[in-house]
Image (cartoon, coloured by chain):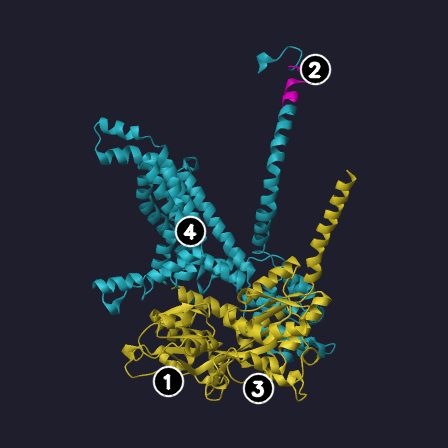
Amino acid sequence: MITKLKYAIAAGTFAIAAALAPQGAEADNMTIVSWGGAYSKSQLRAYHEPYMKKNPGVKIINDESSAEAVAKLRAMAEAKNTTWDVVDVVAADAIRLCDEGLAMTINPDKHLAKAPDGTPASKDFGDLLVSECFIPQIVYSTTFGYRTNVKEWGSKEPKDVCAVFDTKNFPGKRSLEKRPVNNLEWALLCDGVAPNKVYNVLGTPAGIDQALKKLATIKDHIIWWSAGAETPQRLADGQIVMGSTYNGRLFSVIEEQKQPVKMLWDWQVFDLDGWIIPAGLSDARKKRALDYVKFATDTQRLADQAKYISYGPARKSSAPLVGKHADLGIDMAPHMPTDPKNAKTTLLYNYEFWADNRDDIDAKFQAWLTK
Amino acid sequence: MSDLQTADGPLLAADGTSLKASISRALRRQKIRALLLVAPLFLFICITFLAPIADMLFRSVENNIVPETLPQTTQAIQAWDPKSGEAPGEAVYAALYADLKVAVKARNHTKVASRLNYETPGIASLFRKSGRRIKKMKDGNYKEQFLKMDKNWGKLFVWETIHRFSGPYTSGYFLSSVDAEKTSEGVSLKPEDERLYLYLLWRTMLLSVVITITCVLLGYPIAYILADLPLRTSNLLMILVLLPFWTSLLVRTSSWIVLLQEQGVINDFLVMLGIIDDQSRLALMYNETGTVIAMTHILLPFMILPLFSVMKTVSPSYMRAAKSLGASDWTAFWRVYFPNTIPGIGAGGVLVFILAIGYYITPELVGGTSGIFISNRIAYHISSSLNWGLGAALGVMLLGVVLVMYFIYDKIVGIDNVKLG
């Protein structure tokens, strides 16, 4: 009887110890949220692996939920149980999370690494620090790719973004993102609005009508996308002849999958992607998240990421360090959206304008879309 | 009852208490036992289903963020008359300064800004800008300082918005969900180019009805064959009906994309046969057609199964009897067999319709722009625009529509007339 009891106690202690042990280890698990696909892979190789090598106790868990990060962070904050440590979001979402008090404010000079020559982080990132919660990581652009073997086009090739609106010379389906951002800007540019006046015009109801009217001229030729992978897929399938998407996705269609597709850099729209740290983390988790972010956004690490994907590093000091693609061995600099040859005509995503007008214009855009 | 009663009072049980009381005591014990048995499931449903839904729906009228973040301003502004045509006086600006100072410290000013920006674009950046600069403000002359900071602080539309949404509850989300808005002249419909939700709701209902009808038309013959065949064959066929049911929804939807797209299997086949021209391929998806085809396929088992189980209960002797009395095949079917299967059509129809009206993955993937449902907008507001209030209001509206349809169905067909088997 007593031996049985002993066994039971021993088993019980063992069970408790077993239950406690992973929790002790869990303290060193860090959940990093990102976009998945080739992008997450580039982060894994450029940031996570070196960081885990440097800190053997830390285990990084990847979560691919960035697309719905804002809603999920809000839900977590309401449940008072934030399970994410570092989150990769686009700048517009970072601004929203900051507005909602869901992201922690960052002091760049205190929390982020200096450039190798001693330039403080706030100067090295410069204007790209668009929100006080946002730690920029890459500059990417939304731009067009087109197929190079369309029979109906003959020898013609799109030269500028207005080819998208020219269904006479360039017939075929095009794919555009199912949201007003970027599309309305391109529509106005091709409707004769001066580039520096685009947002003044778009700020008026008449300007929105003008842009929607221009878009309406090709409405029947548009297939709308909502995930970045759709355009490259449709281009490869021949379902569309041209379409907008993120430049890194087009790079992979052209250089990695060798599809007959070319980039149309004209009036590419620059946007930023970077890290935020959720508000309300415990001190230990906050400390570790800050440590990770400091490591992952230093000059060398940002330059390293460009070895795996064609997005430009957000630090000025990283640009000279961008080298060759790790697997393909091609020079990455000419594929960067920021390369002078590609960046002859560009727009920068207007964060303030869209933060103010997004809901309103979106309602109009959706109403136009459903009619 | 009266003849059961004795002259000196009510009937007594063996132990001397009144019979009524002792029966009800015995029944009560039974009821409590039944209740206790049901309790776990009941509590589970309350906690995990009803309470979250109620909480979410409550958000459609909740507006606490404004009076809580701007307590003094919302009080001071009550004295202001929006019809005066002038911005409010110094007292309101002083209150705003006091409120903003507290709010900026707690980082709440941007939350209230996003709330008010849903109603009036431009307020978000106004609050964000003011939050950054409030530290530099000096005491006194607040109105002048605010106007200097941003001239929008002197504009009527900003103050009208704060005035209108100063209470703890709002009808703003519900008005938005029916394409209306509150202006200084009262409630009115939004301009034509911004109306969206009523139209979407109408389309959701219309497409759901179309899907339900196609499900009946396609499901009825299949269910009939299944019910009519000998058991062994019908079981085999039943597996074919259930097989897609067990396959992931996304797989089924994606395979429809492969089939229906312009360069897809169906179009290629038709072009190969020479039925259509290569230039005029059919647009079978990214429109209503795609939604109807894919959703009919996905919801078909929900129609076939109740139909099948009802048809199984219709005795073949009814048909034989009808025919022996001289009815033609058609009359026997239409006058005898069909009326007996109506409860199955009713059950399948209600099931398919209610499932269809709330669907969003399939319309999102194959619906393009003209085949999306109102649930796609709800998903957008919950997960993307973060306007949970409007999402909740749209959800309440959808729930209301389903309840009304249910009520109408009950009045016309009768809900007792629904059978799942």
Determine the secondary structure under disc 3: helix
Crowd class of label 4 (few under 14; some 14 to 19; many from 20; radius 10 Å) = many
Do the numbered discs 3 and 4 sit on residues whose CB atoms are within 8 Å? no
Do the numbered discs 3 and 2 sit on residues whose CB atoms are within 8 Å? no
Residue that mark 1 sits on: A159
> What is the CA distance from the residue labelled 3 to the residue labelled 1?
31 Å
Q: Chain of mark 1?
A: A
Q: Chain of mark 4?
A: B
> Which chain's colour is cyan?
B
Residue that mark 4 sits on: B356
Between disc 1 and disc 2, the foreground one is: 1
Residue that mark 3 sits on: A321
In the depicted structure, whether residue A42 falls above or below residue B231: below
Determine the secondary structure under disc 2: loop
Residue that mark 2 sits on: B16
Determine the secondary structure under disc 1: loop
What is the span of residues highlighted in magenta in the rendered image? B11-23
